Amino acid sequence: MSKDINTLLSQAAKWIINAESGARFRVVSHYDADGITAAAIICKTLMRLGFDFHVSLMRNPFTKGIERIKEEKNTHIIFTDMGSGQLPMLEELDANILILDHHQLKTETTKDHIFQVNVNSCGINGNYDACGSTLSYSVSKKVDANNIDLSGLAIAGATGDKQYIGGFKGFNKTLIEDAVNNHAVKEHTGLKLSEPTVSESLYYSVEPYYMNLSGDYDQINHFLTKLQIDKEQPYMELSNQKREDLHSALMLHLMKQGCETTILETVIRTRYTSDMTYGEMEQFADLLDSCGKGGYRDLGLALSLGDEKNYKKAKTHERTFKQDLLDELHRIESEGVNETSSYRYFFTDQTSLGGVIGGIATNFILDTKKPLLSIARKKDEIHISCRGNQNLVKNGLDLGGAMSSIAKKLNGHGGGHKIAAGATLPIDAEETFIKETEKLIHEQLKSQKNEERI
């Protein structure tokens, strides 16, 4: 039987409010846009209550990070956008623990010092309908209704987790409608072109990724000349007609790439802005992702907490990050990827970029018939990131389950969502991993086909 989400949110809010004076709070979160905004929302909430806190943004697995936290004298620890998949490790910590997570739920049973709020136990789909930041925000709003000003961070986090694909739904949608109705965020319809000029915006466009345009100024200039658009003009200063011409040409370009309808619908869509996110939220989510995955986690958190003076510095890092992505995407576009009968995979030197590259390539370069995995070798480990699509999930794909199962077998760590997951394994497990993954994904997709025949 599903738990009631509102009851759990209220209990989580009381868990924070009722902490004794002088409580030492530790906040631990993931290092992507969703994790950073989730952490920022909780930190803002604690600040407004007068509590001190210490924050860490981590990537999975975080065994070494947990070992460090064990040595600290924390009274309260809050895990946002992670925790449910790491329960055995967290049970060893000597502190009161709150988990706010949307990843696959391994068990609802926890030790007495752990209070877990996982949306999946409440009949809410953690893949599409709720994320770490929207869950953290909902707790924050239960703490104080005035925390509605943090809703922009929550929507940015959900955007960073790509939960807008197919339109925001369920838990997320209710939150967004409340924020819009109460004027905490504004909405408009448009395209994401985030640089000062149209040509720069197209050059650094990685999502959407325009094949033979993104990252290529010569092709962009040729494209804009045909449309009679000044390459140096800012997108927002284009006339309505020129903007419509650009929209139509870019959509046609993506259709020729073979993009699925659900992806095409994300390009020109309802967008949200707020003061907390320095404007449009997908652009802000991109900025945070580039900070978190590009080695500047503290900068991403500072921006989310309102440190506007570092915005230009973050934008500089974002360009470097996007250039790295473009280099890898160009390589996939020209060289292709490795392929088995049930999935595709590629190797990369950059462990933090694998999942991002995989998601973009899945949606904008390759067809949607198979999931895509990235494999990065690092010292004595391999880091795997997996990306699927909604259609494959409907047909039985469960990447989170696959990575969890295989990691257990091969003495590693793994898990995530059905549509996106990851694993870290010993370096000598690579060949076995490729074979075992082939069998498991084949069985997942075959099982669904068999059910449909019955």
Image (cartoon, rainbow, N blue to C red):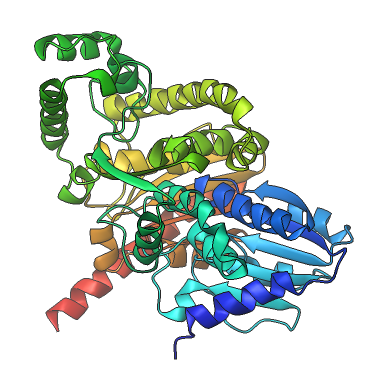
**For residue 348, side relative to residue 50 (left or right):** left
The structure residue drawn at horizontal position 26% and vertical position 19%, both measured from the top left corner, is 237
**For residue 45, side relative to residue 195 (left or right):** right
Q: Nearer the viewer, residue 349 or 209?
A: 209
Q: Quadrant of the N terminus?
A: bottom left
* Residue 421 coordinates in the image, percent (x, y): 46, 56
The structure residue drawn at horizontal position 55% and vertical position 46%, both measured from the top left corner, is 383
Q: Which of 386 and 123 is in front in this view?
A: 123
Position above or below: 306 against 413: above
Q: In which quarter of the image is the C terminus?
A: bottom left
Q: Quadrant of residue 145?
A: bottom right
Res 110 seen here: yes
* Residue 447 coordinates in the image, percent (x, y): 27, 74
The structure residue drawn at horizontal position 62% and vertical position 65%, both measured from the top left corner, is 83
* Residue 172 coordinates in the image, percent (x, y): 39, 62
The structure residue drawn at horizontal position 41% and vertical position 35%, both measured from the top left corner, is 283
What count of labels does the image hold? 0
Res 429 seen here: no
Position above or below: 106 against 214: below
Q: Quadrant of residue 211?
A: top left
* Residue 353 coordinates in the image, percent (x, y): 49, 37
**For residue 166, side relative to residue 51 (left or right):** left
**For residue 277, side relative to residue 72 (left or right):** left
